[in-house]
């Protein structure tokens, strides 16, 4: 019986920890580059981006990569970003899409930047 409880506890903790990747992508825009976790550049064309981004209205809607919920306070954010002026300064290049279903990675090699 103890082994069964231990096994269930381990399985439950694994499930909960794997769901953190589904955690909302709460983003806060900082004023200074030194405050940022990620430096971001907005590209003009979808083909140039690493990540296609859609800003959602509610935190509960941000359930996959590329769905960003912008928070009002830095303490609420999962990641702090700073928008740079030049592509060469960026850690991540994004393109804003018109529809939620379009959001997601184009360059999976950069996905580690938004892991929580």
Image (cartoon, grey):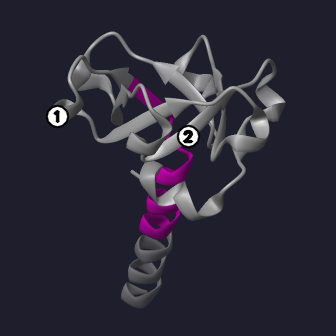
Quarter holding residue 35: top left
Cα separation, mark 2 vs mark 1, equals 18 Å
- Point 48% across, 65% down: residue: 12
- Point 26% across, 34% down: residue: 36
Q: Quadrant of the N terminus?
A: bottom left
Reply above or below: 64 against 109.
above
- Point 81% across, 21% down: residue: 99
In the rendered structure, which disc, 2 or 1, sits on the residue that comes first in sequence? 1
Reply above or below: 88 against 57.
below
Q: Main secondary structure of the magenta part?
A: helix
The boundaries of the magenta stretch are: 12-27
Where residue 65 sits in the image (x, y, percent)? 62, 43
- Foreground of the two, 54 or 13: 54
Q: Which residue position holds label 1?
A: 34
Number of residues whose C-alpha sits closer than 10 Å to that of mark 2, classed few (under 14), some (14–19) or many (20 or more): many
Examine the structure image and report whether residue 23 is included in the region drawn in magenta: yes
Q: Among all residues in the image, which is located at the extreme left?
A: 34
- Foreground of the two, 89 or 17: 89
Q: Which mark is residue 96?
A: none
Where residue 27 sits in the image (x, y, percent)? 41, 27
Where residue 62 sits in the image (x, y, percent)? 60, 30
Quarter holding residue 100: top right
Side (left or right) of 35 relative to 28:
left
Side (left or right) of 111 relative to 100:
left
Number of residues whose C-alpha sits closer than 10 Å to that of mark 1, classed few (under 14), some (14–19) or many (20 or more): few
Quarter holding residue 52: top right
Q: Secondary structure at mark 2?
A: strand
Where residue 86 sits in the image (x, y, percent)? 44, 32
Examine the structure image and report whether residue 5 is included in the region drawn in magenta: no
Q: Which residue position holds label 2?
A: 93
């Amino acid at each position: 019986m103890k082994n069964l409880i231990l096994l269930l506890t381990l399985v439950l903790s694994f499930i909960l920890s794997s769901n953190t990747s589904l955690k909302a992508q709460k983003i806060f825009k900082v004023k200074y580059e030194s405050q940022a976790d990620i430096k971001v550049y907005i590209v003009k064309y979808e083909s140039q981006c690493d990540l296609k981004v859609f800003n959602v209205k509610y935190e509960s809607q941000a359930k996959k990569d590329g769905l960003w919920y912008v928070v009002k306070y830095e303490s609420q954010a999962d990641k702090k970003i700073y928008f740079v002026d030049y592509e060469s300064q960026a850690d991540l290049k994004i393109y804003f899409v018109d529809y939620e279903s379009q959001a997601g990675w184009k360059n999976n090699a950069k996905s580690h930047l938004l892991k929580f």
